[in-house]
Image: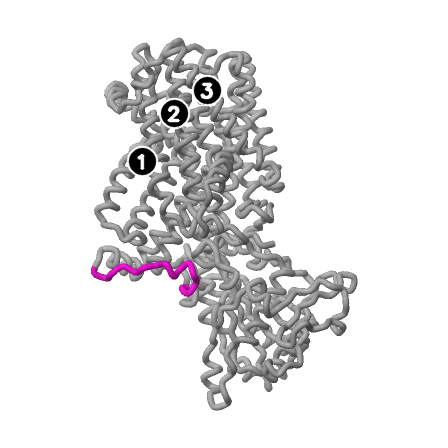
Amino acid sequence: MDLETGIHQHRVKKESLRTVLTLAYQSLGVVYGDLSTSPLYVFKSTFAEDIEHSETNEEIFGVLSFVFWTLTLLPLLKYVFIVLKADDNGEGGTFALYSLLCRHARVNSLPSSQVADEDLSMYKDIISPAPSTFSGRLKSTLEKQRVLQKCLLLLALTGACMVIGDGILSPALSVFSAVSGIELAMSKEHHKYIEVPFACLILIALFALQHYGTHRVGFLFAPVVITWLFCISAIGVYNIFHWNPHVYQALSPYYVYKFLKKTQKGGWMSLGGILLCVTGSEAMFADLGHFSQLSIKIAFTSIVYPSLVLAYMGQAAYLSQHHVVDNDYRIGFYVSVPEKLRWPVLVIAILAAVVGSQAIITGTFSIIKQCSALGCFPRVKIVHTSSKIHGQIYIPEINWTLMLLCLAVTIGFRDTKSMGNASGLAVITVMLVTTCLMSLVIVLCWHQSIVLAICFVVFFGTFEALYFSASLIKFLGGAWVPIALSFIFMLVMCVWHYGMLRQYESDVQNRVSIDRLLSLGPSLGIVRVGGIGLIHTELVSGIPAIFSHFVTNIPAFHQVLIFLCVKSVSIPHVKNEERYLVGRIGLKEYRIYRCIVRYGYRDAHVDNEQFENDLVCSIVEYIRTGRADLDSADEDAAKRREEMMVVGTPTTHLDRIQVREDDDDVANTELASTSELRETRSPPVIRPRKRVRFVIPESPEIDQNVRYELRELMRAREAGVAYIMGHSYVRAKQGSSLIKKIVINYGYDFLRRNCRANIYALNVPPASTLEVGMVYHI
């Protein structure tokens, strides 16, 4: 399935007004679900223990002023007007910023990167700064200093780990806060036995339905969020005019000063609850790839931002006239809702919380996919739940892990105060990471003055650091949860990345040359058998040690050999016409090829049948259009050099390769042209798997040597394809330190044994798979 088709159309072509408004409408359900439900718990978390609501109303007006300016400075000013412009070819998020910096600074965490990758079209818009400028000096320093490169990667991983932590905490907080409205309908002794089970049931149902994907009910998301925003804004307007029409005066920053002057340390500690008003703001940037900058800006500035401000003003207006607090009365959202509307609003709130949680869970799947593509997370099963909507994915292992952790948080805390403390720290940490990465983007990618970057960090960083300190002080009150979760995920990521780098370095050191391999032929009695041998390897050059190990023990290999490397590059998408790099290993008569398949960190991998066909077609295209072999006088040079050529998928050269679906035998196929290759598939009744066949026309336009090579490839393809993969066991070298032995022998080995194979997405049939066991000492 082709999930990339048309995903860039809204960025390449000028958007019409109708398209922009449609995307803005859709973004309300996908992007703003979590942010729109924040009024459910902000006031309740803020007044939980640090400050009290007094008759002077200085506390409630101070909190309102803080909320207003926090919403204005962070989501509106920082994200809408600045951060959204730092997209990575239309994609956003923590790893999009990191990927952007990697390309501009020529640093990369992927060991399989090549110079040829820089010829991709997404690299060509990079303008290197002058060496004499600060941008040029910073770029040169990053390229030379490995320590700084590791620090940059750790910073990006910290943000990613906190996003995953937020994917656990936000659903629990949103759903529990929405369900807590039932406390006003029953006594305190009874509602505490209803809230937790009811919230857990909703969470279980939410995670259990993830494998169906959101595309089936996604059309309901935007109406639910719009209905919710309309409810809270309408209730806010009612409360303003009915209880306190002068509440707008609290929007003045003077009330912030009065609030801090009166509450002092308690007011500072309460900022951890106020911070929750921007929960979900990062989604505006993280989900940028599904929409456009303009649509997200229109949705936030015209609908979300005014609705949230009115909702908070309405709650403050109501609370300014109600100061009695007893056991059956709490400062929260539902107390400000008119009594006749509480049950309908409760239902809408639960639906809105589910929609917001769905967006967070999908965002967690997305960030884990990006981490895995960039070599920073163990390979997991990724299921694309929609063939039309790009980015709708489902990861079973992560889904059930999130569900268990989410239930543990809900059952363990059982109140919004502790959940809010935990969620607030995760939210503000991601924002701080974004601020730090953005300062580098301003200098390295936008080539702006260092003064501008410092002003950006000082202005937003100081504001966020204030909130961060207030959240961190609640460590024992629940803030330890995101720290513990992030530490676990960070440990997994670092162990996996370190082990992967060491294993790749071992592969490079132990690779063999084609000359040495063929020189063993007479002594071993190597024979060539029919078919195509597809050897999967992580290497982009040379022959992997697993193949040498295989030939040494079984002195035979296939008529046609293809060394296949499926790798990711640090760009979001690779165009179809730039997908394949194809080259020849050794002389032409060896019939040994190398094919490197490149995917962006947001690309979807095709299934086995389509991939196998595309792979053979790419080699056919290389044979047809590649350079002719050197003559015998240049044999040594030909052996040493592997010339790679960019070959697109068959859809990029359909004028030369045609696909036929008829059931006729290939011998009866008529050629419409004498200068084209044809591709046909055998009927399913003959073979359960469709096979590609090529008819080589007798035409003087095709060289005889090329025709002969194509015929051999055709015969090998008809004989079948065998997948030869390495099954490695990794051990630390003798003399290694104790820490390295623990990391490699236990940590990395455990992750390798329990993760997916590198080409699991191809659904390779077991009958066509041959695994070669080998022990790596790294």
Mark toward the start of the polypeptide (2 vs 1) = 2
Mark 2, secondary structure of its residue: helix
Residue at the disc numbered 2: 309
Name the residue: 42% across, 52% down: 89
Tell me the element at label 3.
helix
Give the residues drawn in magenta, as a range. 118-132
Label 2 vs label 1: CA separation?
20 Å
The residue carrying pointer 1 sits among few (fewer than 14), some (14 to 19) or many (20 or more) residues within 10 Å by Cα, namely many
Three-letter amino acid code at the position of disc 2: Val
* Distance between mark 3 and mark 2 Cα atoms: 11 Å
**Is residue 531 visible in the rendered structure shown here?**
no
- Quadrant of the frame with the N terminus: bottom right
| Residue for point 44% across, 28% down | 38
Residue 603 visible in the snapshot? yes
Residue 122 drawn at (x, y percent): 42, 58
Q: Amino acid at mark 3?
A: Ala
Rendered location of residue 307, percent (x, y)? 42, 26
Q: Is the Cβ of the residue at disc 3 closer than 8 Å to that at disc 2? A: no
Mark 1 lies on residue: 464
Q: Nearer the viewer, mark 3 or mark 2?
A: 3
Q: CA distance from mark 1 to mark 3?
A: 31 Å
